[in-house]
Image (tube, helix red, strand yellow):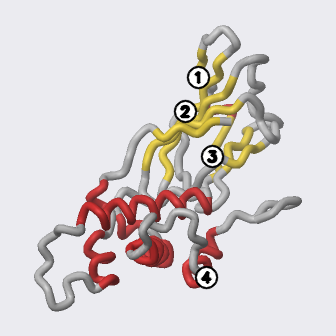
Amino acid sequence: MQLVQETAYAATELPVADLSAYLRLSSGFPDDGSEDARLQALLAAAVETIEARLSLVLLERRFRWRTERWSNPASVVLPVAPVRQVDSVTMTDADGASNAVDPALWRLVPDDRTPRLQARGACLPPIPPGGMAEVSFPAGFGPTWPDVPVDLRQAVVMLAADWYDRPAGGSGVPIASDILRLLQPYRRLRIGGAA
Protein backbone atom coordinates (compact mmCIF):
# COMPACT_ATOMS: atom_id res chain seq x y z
CA MET A 1 0.00 0.00 0.00
CA GLN A 2 1.29 3.44 -0.94
CA LEU A 3 -0.28 6.84 -0.40
CA VAL A 4 1.06 9.63 -2.62
CA GLN A 5 0.23 13.27 -1.97
CA GLU A 6 -0.20 14.98 -5.34
CA THR A 7 -0.83 18.57 -4.25
CA ALA A 8 0.11 20.75 -1.29
CA TYR A 9 -1.93 23.23 0.71
CA ALA A 10 -1.11 26.91 0.47
CA ALA A 11 1.38 27.79 3.23
CA THR A 12 -0.48 31.09 3.60
CA GLU A 13 -3.39 29.10 5.08
CA LEU A 14 -1.36 28.33 8.22
CA PRO A 15 -2.46 30.51 11.16
CA VAL A 16 0.80 32.39 11.77
CA ALA A 17 -1.07 35.33 13.35
CA ASP A 18 -2.96 32.97 15.70
CA LEU A 19 0.28 31.33 16.85
CA SER A 20 1.97 34.71 17.29
CA ALA A 21 -0.96 35.90 19.41
CA TYR A 22 -0.98 32.66 21.42
CA LEU A 23 2.73 33.14 22.16
CA ARG A 24 2.16 36.86 22.80
CA LEU A 25 5.09 37.70 20.55
CA SER A 26 3.87 41.18 19.71
CA SER A 27 2.84 42.00 23.27
CA GLY A 28 4.42 45.40 23.92
CA PHE A 29 6.41 45.28 20.67
CA PRO A 30 5.46 46.01 17.07
CA ASP A 31 5.12 42.83 14.99
CA ASP A 32 7.80 43.13 12.31
CA GLY A 33 7.18 39.62 10.93
CA SER A 34 10.73 38.51 11.70
CA GLU A 35 9.46 35.29 13.32
CA ASP A 36 6.90 34.45 10.64
CA ALA A 37 9.02 31.90 8.73
CA ARG A 38 9.85 30.04 11.94
CA LEU A 39 6.22 30.10 13.10
CA GLN A 40 5.07 28.84 9.70
CA ALA A 41 7.59 25.97 9.85
CA LEU A 42 6.44 25.01 13.36
CA LEU A 43 2.80 25.10 12.27
CA ALA A 44 3.54 22.95 9.20
CA ALA A 45 5.33 20.42 11.43
CA ALA A 46 2.41 20.43 13.88
CA VAL A 47 -0.09 19.87 11.06
CA GLU A 48 2.01 16.98 9.73
CA THR A 49 2.36 15.42 13.19
CA ILE A 50 -1.36 15.61 13.94
CA GLU A 51 -2.32 14.34 10.49
CA ALA A 52 0.01 11.35 10.84
CA ARG A 53 -1.23 10.56 14.33
CA LEU A 54 -4.92 10.65 13.34
CA SER A 55 -4.81 9.57 9.65
CA LEU A 56 -6.61 12.84 8.92
CA VAL A 57 -5.95 15.53 6.34
CA LEU A 58 -6.63 18.96 7.81
CA LEU A 59 -6.20 21.19 4.75
CA GLU A 60 -7.48 19.76 1.47
CA ARG A 61 -5.04 18.10 -0.89
CA ARG A 62 -5.18 15.51 -3.68
CA PHE A 63 -3.98 11.95 -3.11
CA ARG A 64 -3.40 8.75 -5.01
CA TRP A 65 -3.61 5.49 -3.07
CA ARG A 66 -2.11 2.32 -4.53
CA THR A 67 -2.70 -1.17 -3.20
CA GLU A 68 -1.83 -4.65 -4.42
CA ARG A 69 -4.79 -6.26 -2.67
CA TRP A 70 -8.10 -5.29 -1.16
CA SER A 71 -8.10 -5.85 2.62
CA ASN A 72 -11.79 -6.75 2.26
CA PRO A 73 -13.18 -7.57 -1.19
CA ALA A 74 -16.53 -5.89 -0.47
CA SER A 75 -15.38 -2.63 1.16
CA VAL A 76 -12.02 -1.01 1.96
CA VAL A 77 -11.31 1.89 4.30
CA LEU A 78 -9.30 4.62 2.61
CA PRO A 79 -6.03 5.46 4.41
CA VAL A 80 -6.90 9.08 5.20
CA ALA A 81 -10.03 11.09 5.99
CA PRO A 82 -12.19 13.02 5.43
CA VAL A 83 -12.96 12.01 1.84
CA ARG A 84 -16.13 13.24 0.14
CA GLN A 85 -15.45 12.12 -3.43
CA VAL A 86 -13.35 9.64 -5.39
CA ASP A 87 -12.31 10.80 -8.84
CA SER A 88 -11.18 7.49 -10.27
CA VAL A 89 -10.29 3.86 -9.62
CA THR A 90 -7.75 2.36 -12.01
CA MET A 91 -6.40 -1.18 -12.33
CA THR A 92 -2.85 -1.74 -13.56
CA ASP A 93 -1.69 -5.20 -14.58
CA ALA A 94 1.79 -6.72 -14.11
CA ASP A 95 2.85 -5.38 -17.54
CA GLY A 96 1.89 -1.81 -16.61
CA ALA A 97 -1.27 -1.58 -18.72
CA SER A 98 -3.93 0.51 -16.94
CA ASN A 99 -7.70 0.51 -17.25
CA ALA A 100 -10.23 2.74 -15.52
CA VAL A 101 -12.76 0.84 -13.42
CA ASP A 102 -16.37 1.61 -14.29
CA PRO A 103 -17.87 3.78 -11.49
CA ALA A 104 -20.97 1.58 -11.70
CA LEU A 105 -18.90 -1.12 -9.92
CA TRP A 106 -17.96 0.93 -6.84
CA ARG A 107 -19.10 3.83 -4.70
CA LEU A 108 -17.64 6.02 -2.00
CA VAL A 109 -19.12 5.85 1.47
CA PRO A 110 -18.02 9.33 2.61
CA ASP A 111 -17.09 9.83 6.23
CA ASP A 112 -15.04 12.27 8.29
CA ARG A 113 -13.17 9.42 10.01
CA THR A 114 -13.43 6.17 8.01
CA PRO A 115 -14.35 6.78 4.36
CA ARG A 116 -14.75 3.55 2.40
CA LEU A 117 -14.64 2.40 -1.18
CA GLN A 118 -17.51 -0.08 -1.40
CA ALA A 119 -18.55 -2.55 -4.07
CA ARG A 120 -21.90 -1.88 -5.73
CA GLY A 121 -22.23 -5.65 -6.08
CA ALA A 122 -20.78 -8.43 -3.95
CA CYS A 123 -17.10 -7.52 -4.46
CA LEU A 124 -14.85 -4.77 -5.71
CA PRO A 125 -13.23 -5.58 -9.07
CA PRO A 126 -10.33 -8.02 -8.61
CA ILE A 127 -6.81 -6.62 -8.71
CA PRO A 128 -4.81 -8.29 -11.50
CA PRO A 129 -2.08 -10.74 -10.32
CA GLY A 130 1.16 -8.78 -9.94
CA GLY A 131 -0.75 -5.56 -10.51
CA MET A 132 -2.35 -2.89 -8.39
CA ALA A 133 -5.42 -0.74 -7.88
CA GLU A 134 -5.04 3.03 -7.78
CA VAL A 135 -7.66 5.30 -6.20
CA SER A 136 -7.46 9.08 -6.80
CA PHE A 137 -9.29 11.47 -4.49
CA PRO A 138 -9.19 14.81 -2.70
CA ALA A 139 -9.10 14.62 1.10
CA GLY A 140 -9.35 17.20 3.84
CA PHE A 141 -11.81 19.32 5.76
CA GLY A 142 -11.51 22.11 3.18
CA PRO A 143 -9.01 24.39 1.45
CA THR A 144 -8.93 27.10 4.13
CA TRP A 145 -7.93 27.11 7.81
CA PRO A 146 -11.46 27.99 9.06
CA ASP A 147 -12.72 24.76 7.38
CA VAL A 148 -10.75 22.72 9.94
CA PRO A 149 -12.71 21.87 13.13
CA VAL A 150 -11.95 24.36 15.91
CA ASP A 151 -10.53 21.76 18.32
CA LEU A 152 -8.04 20.54 15.71
CA ARG A 153 -7.06 24.13 14.89
CA GLN A 154 -6.43 24.73 18.60
CA ALA A 155 -4.37 21.53 18.88
CA VAL A 156 -2.14 22.62 15.97
CA VAL A 157 -1.51 26.05 17.52
CA MET A 158 -0.85 24.56 20.97
CA LEU A 159 1.56 21.95 19.59
CA ALA A 160 3.47 24.54 17.55
CA ALA A 161 3.62 26.80 20.63
CA ASP A 162 4.88 23.92 22.75
CA TRP A 163 7.72 23.39 20.28
CA TYR A 164 8.54 27.11 19.95
CA ASP A 165 11.02 27.29 22.85
CA ARG A 166 12.56 23.85 22.37
CA PRO A 167 15.99 23.77 20.71
CA ALA A 168 15.14 20.81 18.45
CA GLY A 169 11.68 22.17 17.66
CA GLY A 170 10.00 19.48 19.71
CA SER A 171 11.66 16.52 18.04
CA GLY A 172 11.29 13.43 20.20
CA VAL A 173 9.21 15.23 22.84
CA PRO A 174 5.88 13.59 23.78
CA ILE A 175 2.73 15.50 22.93
CA ALA A 176 1.27 17.24 25.99
CA SER A 177 -1.82 15.67 27.56
CA ASP A 178 -4.02 18.74 26.99
CA ILE A 179 -3.29 18.51 23.26
CA LEU A 180 -3.94 14.75 23.27
CA ARG A 181 -7.36 15.40 24.82
CA LEU A 182 -8.22 17.67 21.89
CA LEU A 183 -7.17 14.94 19.45
CA GLN A 184 -8.89 12.03 21.21
CA PRO A 185 -12.32 12.35 19.52
CA TYR A 186 -10.65 12.03 16.11
CA ARG A 187 -8.68 8.84 16.73
CA ARG A 188 -9.65 5.89 14.58
CA LEU A 189 -10.70 2.87 16.57
CA ARG A 190 -9.40 -0.42 15.25
CA ILE A 191 -11.20 -3.60 16.14
CA GLY A 192 -8.76 -6.29 17.21
CA GLY A 193 -5.85 -3.88 17.53
CA ALA A 194 -4.62 -0.76 19.26
CA ALA A 195 -6.33 2.56 18.62
The kind of residue tagged 2 is: Ser
Mark 4 surroundings within 10 Å by alpha-carbon count, few (fewer than 14), some (14 through 19), many (20 or more) = few
Which residue corresponds to the image point at 60% horizontal and 51% vertical from the top-left? 80
Seen from this angle, which residue lies furthest front? 167
Residue located beneath label 1 in the image: 100
Q: Disc 1 on helix, strand or loop?
A: strand
- Whole-angstrom CA distance, mark 4 to mark 1, is 46 Å
- Whole-angstrom CA distance, mark 2 to mark 3, is 11 Å
Query: Residue 54: which quarter of the image?
Result: bottom right
- Whole-angstrom CA distance, mark 4 to mark 2, is 40 Å
Earlier-in-chain disc, 4 versus 1: 1
Q: Disc 4 on helix, strand or loop?
A: helix
Label ID, residue 108: 3
Mark 2 surroundings within 10 Å by alpha-carbon count, few (fewer than 14), some (14 through 19), many (20 or more) = some
Across and down, in percent, residue 127 comes to 74, 24
- Whole-angstrom CA distance, mark 4 to mark 3, is 35 Å
Where, quadrant-wise, is the C terminus in this rendering?
bottom right
Earlier-in-chain disc, 4 versus 3: 3
Earlier-in-chain disc, 2 versus 3: 2
Across and down, in percent, residue 75 comes to 76, 44
Label 1 with label 2: CB-CB less than 8 Å = yes
| Drawn side of residue 12 relative to residue 62, left or right | left
Across and down, in percent, residue 143 comes to 36, 56
The kind of residue tagged 3 is: Leu
Instruction: Give the camera-side residue of 14 and 45.
Output: 45
The kind of residue tagged 1 is: Ala
Across and down, in percent, residue 177 comes to 61, 82
Up-down relation of residue 71 to residue 10 (above or below)? above
Residue located beneath label 2 in the image: 88
Earlier-in-chain disc, 1 versus 2: 2
Q: Disc 2 on helix, strand or loop?
A: strand
Label ID, residue 177: 4
